[in-house]
Amino acid sequence: MTATFAELLQTLPPVDHLAALELLDASGHTVARLENKPGSAGSVRVYAALAAEYGSINAAAAARGLELFAEHTAAARAHPGSHPNIDRLLQLIGTTAQWQVRSIPANS
C-alpha cells in the first residue's frame, strides 16, 4: 500500500519556526515564496526537508519531492496549474537548474 501525502508529511521535520521559504535562482533572484500558512504549509514542509537533504532544490530533490507529494503529484500532472508548488518540481526534472532555499523565520 502506498503512503498518502498526509502520512508522508508526518515523517518530515516540523516547520513551525518558519514564516516562509524563498526559492532563489542562480542570480539570487527570488523565483517563488512559499508561505507557511494553511493551504501551503505542507509544501513548505516538503521543500524545507528537500533543502535540508539535498542542499538545494535540484532535479534529484524534485524527484524526491514528487514522491512525497504522493497522490497530489498525479493530480498536478492531470491538471497543470492547480498545484503550483508541484508544477515547479515537475519543471526541474531532467534539467541542471537548481534553486537555493532561504528560510524566513517566524516572528516570535
Image (tube, rainbow, N blue to C red):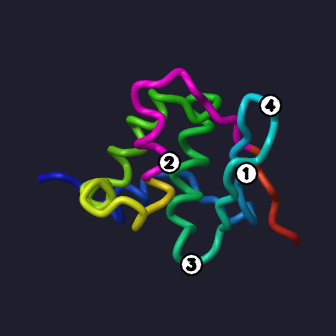
Q: Are marks 3 and 4 in contact (CB under 8 Å)?
A: no
Point 56% across, 56% down: residue: 45
Q: Position of residue 68 (x, y in %)?
A: 37, 49
Helix, strand or loop under label 2: helix
Residue 88 has which mark?
Answer: 2
Q: Position of residue 87 (x, y in %)?
A: 44, 52
Q: Are marks 1 and 3 in contact (CB under 8 Å)?
A: no
Q: Nearer the viewer, mark 3 or mark 4?
A: 4
Residue 22 has which mark?
Answer: 1
Above or below — where is 3 with respect to 55? Answer: below
Point 56% across, 52% down: residue: 13
For marks 2 and 1, give the CA distance. 13 Å
Circle 3 residues within 10 Å: few <14, some 14–19, many ≥20: few
Question: Which residue ends up furthest to the right in the rendered image?
Answer: 108
Residue 27 has which mark?
Answer: 4
Helix, strand or loop under label 3: loop
Q: Where is residue 8 in the image (x, y as percent from the top left)?
A: 36, 55
